[in-house]
Amino acid sequence: MTEILVTGLDLIDLGIRGLEPVIEEIIRKAEKEVHMMTYLFTAGALHILDLIENTAERGINIVIVVNNLQFQEGKVVSRLRHISLRFPHAKIYDFIDPEKRQLHAKVVVVDRKKAVVGSANLSWGGMYSNYEIGLFIEGKAAWKLAEIIDFLSSKSTRI
């Protein structure tokens, strides 16, 4: 199954589901693990980290790969470090490529069964105000996305 997701009220008013509510929904329903990969994570999406922390409190394994943490907002980096220190099963990775390539992907995978892939950063603009498009995916592709995140985390520094 594949479903188009969007941000931007004009698009949501067309009857297309919003990207952010679907991300929240699948994370809340996680039974075993959550994988995330993002280029930009700002304070405008700290509620996603609240949800991740609540999920980790339930014993769910977390893997988050963030592009170049030194360029992320201080509040976000502090929260990521806090989650990583508080929960040994929450593994947060700083992606810095020696060849200066950027991790520009925006992906959330839950239980290797469901995923959201799209253009939206984890930011106020990405979740609400911009026109962004994403896909909700179920099945084998979600499993493969989790494998990609695992691979990139192995090339990153755990914080």
Image: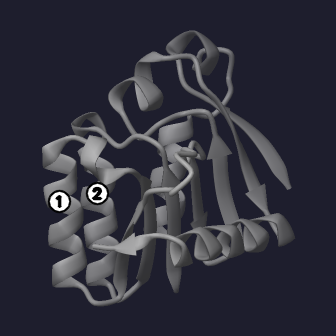
Q: Which quadrant holds residue 1?
A: bottom right
Looking at the picture, how far across and down is residue 115, in whole percent? 66, 59
Residue 79: image tag: 1
Answer yes or no: do the residues labelled 2 and 1 have beta carbons within 8 Å? yes
Looking at the picture, how far across and down is residue 25, in whole percent? 50, 56
Q: In the rendered image, is residue 6 in sight?
A: yes
> Height in image: 135 above or below 64?
above
Relative placement, left or right, of 37 versus 78 is right
Relative placement, left or right, of 91 versus 154 is left
Residue 49: image tag: 2
Which residue: 21% across, 50% down?
Answer: 76
Q: Which quadrant holds residue 158?
A: bottom left
Which residue: 76% across, 55% down?
Answer: 137
Which residue: 60% across, 15% down?
Answer: 13
For mark 1, give the secondary structure: helix
> Height in image: 111 above or below 4?
below
Of the pair 114 and 103, the residue shown nearer to us? 103
The CA distance from mark 2 to mark 1 is 7 Å
Residue 13: image tag: none
Q: Mark 1: which amino acid?
A: Arg
Q: Earlier in the sequence, mark 2 or mark 1?
A: 2
> Height in image: 16 above or below 147?
above
How many numbered tags mark residues here?
2
For mark 2, give the secondary structure: helix
